[in-house]
Image (cartoon, coloured by chain):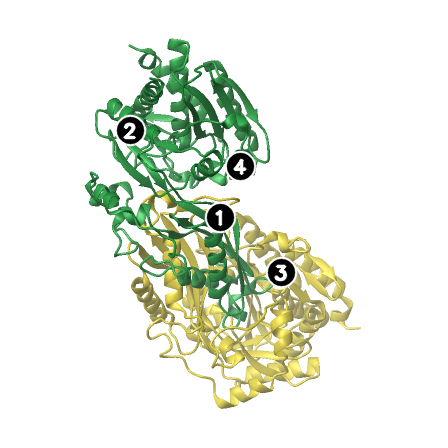
Chain colours: A yellow, B green
Amino acid sequence: MNYYQQNRQTFLEGLQTFLRIPSISTLSEHKPDIRRAAEFVRNELSAAGLQSELIEGNGNPLVYGEWLGAPGKPTLLLYGHYDVQPPDPLDEWKSPPFEPSVRGNDIFARGSSDDKGQTYILMKAVEGLLKSKGRLPVNVKFLIEGEEETGGEHIEEYVKSRPPRLKCDAAVICDTEMFAPELPTICVGLRGIVYGELHVEGANHDLHSGVYGGAAPNPLQAIAEIVTALKDRDGHIRIPGFYDRVTPPSSKEREAWARLPFDEIDYTTKEMGARQLVGEPEVPLFERLWARPTFEVHGIRGGFVGEGAKTVIPARAVAKISTRLVADQRPDEAIAQLKEAVRKAAPKGVTAEFKLIHSAGPSLVNPDNPFIQAAAQAMTEAFGKETVYIRSGGSIPIVGVFDEFLGIPSVMLGFGLPDDNLHAPNEKFHLPNFYRGIEAVAHYLESLGR
Amino acid sequence: MNYYQQNRQTFLEGLQTFLRIPSISTLSEHKPDIRRAAEFVRNELSAAGLQSELIEGNGNPLVYGEWLGAPGKPTLLLYGHYDVQPPDPLDEWKSPPFEPSVRGNDIFARGSSDDKGQTYILMKAVEGLLKSKGRLPVNVKFLIEGEEETGGEHIEEYVKSRPPRLKCDAAVICDTEMFAPELPTICVGLRGIVYGELHVEGANHDLHSGVYGGAAPNPLQAIAEIVTALKDRDGHIRIPGFYDRVTPPSSKEREAWARLPFDEIDYTTKEMGARQLVGEPEVPLFERLWARPTFEVHGIRGGFVGEGAKTVIPARAVAKISTRLVADQRPDEAIAQLKEAVRKAAPKGVTAEFKLIHSAGPSLVNPDNPFIQAAAQAMTEAFGKETVYIRSGGSIPIVGVFDEFLGIPSVMLGFGLPDDNLHAPNEKFHLPNFYRGIEAVAHYLESLGR
């Protein structure tokens, strides 16, 4: 047994400790947990033999750790995040979100797959090489952030300042998924995002729907009118100019996607638990998910949603909305288009304004890059199957920032699975992927050091 | 000074005690407060000299009190309600909703106008006659309920059983408003209501909008699509058949409405605090408010509405919706039309169902009825101005029930004012109307006894 096989139980216990910290970055009452999680990561990196510290700034601390004892070898920036999504709705969890529960081959907890489990893979891969061989085959710089789920301003500000200590040859990002169990996967494209709030105001106080109904503007109805004006029933976004920069995938990419092992009925009914798929009917599924922009409503606040009946026409209402962007859309342009479309779609009697919370550009990585080729080779060897290239519909804003400000490509090695319930109740991580992922990353570092 | 003038301070203190009880009928945690409010009313009626008791049944207790010492004289059923609306949004109240605050000529508290202040007018008018003269000029039967704000099933069940003790000649309902300050007003028409929840389900668990956006059904977007399908941007309801039974007001009524003293700019900007009025552009304002059905969204639950960003596509969402009905629409037919329209408007990938919470028919009273004529005369004398006849856009379901099951007309004497902020923060009641209302009701009873 090698170091990795000997220490599986220790790795699992460490991960459980990490998962017990409710480091929810979108809720300010969890600030102390955010710091506990950052300190946990720093302590683990120190214990593994790296020089590590917290980098403070506007927002949640970054954890930095480095080992630079391989002169002449490549330097990798290892990225993950220690913050997690809120766990609600709480009553749908089968075990409490911050009390990790191992059932069968899976560990259930908020953050298990996104992204504590995957971040821990990077940490344990490096620890294993240092503990078993006393050195690493390449130089590494960890940069683990705590605001990925809420916009990541701190890391962006820091990277945009181009600090000399971040100089490196490529980033390795462990925050995506495998296309299917046992199928080694590298992600080469991400959607961007524009997330914000749609604020609608009608009268300056709540009104009785009996007394004023028929004359009073209703901000909830106005939100409905705006969001249906912005997206039609077939999923086409009706924001003028929104598709102008959308670049379709190449025919080679489309053909590769068509060859991916995929059962649409299983995907629909088991993975998503849906009756049928929706969205632009004329666009194939993977293209809808990976290469087309979307518009979604995430929540609507305002009026009365308690038990029973309240006949109120609320003075104001707020919708959380987002759009996902694809190459070559530009966030600033998309925001301007969205703002203007919201303004135009507002019905009589209300004001409507889009207020940005965060945004990130889409990114596409060239799979011919040698760091990606080496990763694909290491994954193929670790899993015994040809590595596939996919894109992700999600957004990892830092990929674009690394590209623009550090001039480095990102290698997205994913060990999550499609049914991991990211951002949803009963999030899980597949433990065989956890253990094998640690070995695959170690293998990758060794191959880059040769 | 008569009894009424001597006791104003005592009346005010009694009202304040009544208002301090948070008897919110839509929230089950306030059940004990509901009972405290019912007992307060019963104790006051007993102290005034009536035989009184609580009538228990399914739901909140009814308070019954009678004085039947005027044989040969008419018998009146005096109706009000001791329950109130929830006070949220709490942070918009200038003084706490259940700590009555007198500022200038107004008393601010939840329920001050709707309907504790007005119910208390009936109670104090009768008390004054009994205390000062030892007897009443007519027979009275109080029936004060505790579920008006949440559907009123208990009183309906009770009245529908046609109990012999409710035999009487007319009902007096004190739960409406004066058209303008100092302008004596009788309400002769009410809208009905259908209130319920629109339940929409997409996938069987929450989904990540990055990973699944473009293929996943979004119940919040579906609610937006349904409610915009059911009502167009000009306020026309698009439910097939919904207007078939709508009876327009007579030309005589339209002309009387056109003569009401009214400043539309003041109404829009001061009373409503709105930028402009909305609704069917081809229908005059009072007709929109009093004689046309409406469709409103009161709140939408589902997804994420907390601080920050959560990129969730919720599995399900619920909208609180209602329609107001006008003569001669029938609630059962309207509910069936609404259910069918919701089903048809549901987009691909979701199920949508309307679940009824409560309903009530519209009502129209003939103003030539002698009880209404006497009330108009008494009001004219108390306020020194010709009494006007209006309708109300709100719903008082019991009026239709009294008509159908007791065969009696309802006299709607209102002492609220248009800017009382019913169902909204900073609800108030105009104290001069409170004191003068007590005397006007006493005057009315005396005139009926002659």
Within 10 Å of the Cα at label 4, are there few (<14), some (14-19), or many (20+) other Cα atoms? some
Q: Nearer the viewer, mark 1 or mark 2?
A: 2
Work out whether A272 lies above or below A251.
above
Circles 3 and 2, Cβ within 8 Å, touching? The answer is: no
Say which label, 4 or 2, has the lower sequence index.
4
Report the residue marked by disc 2.
Answer: B376
The residue at which mark 3 appears reads as: A46
How far, Cα to Cα, is label 1 from label 2? 40 Å
Q: Secondary structure under badge 4?
A: helix
Q: Give the residue pinned by disc 4.
A: B160
C-alpha span from label 3 to label 1: 49 Å
Residue type at tag 1: Val
Marks 3 and 1: CB-CB under 8 Å? no
Residue drawn at x 50%, y 38% as measured from the top left: B152
Foreground mark, 1 or 4? 4
Q: Amino acid at mark 2?
A: Ala
Whole-angstrom CA distance, mark 3 to mark 2, is 87 Å
Q: Are marks 1 and 2 in contact (CB under 8 Å)?
A: no
Quarter of the figure with residue B267: top left
- Return the x and y of residue A329 as percentages of the image width and height: 39, 75
Labels 3 and 4 in the same subunit: no
Which label was assigned to residue A305?
1
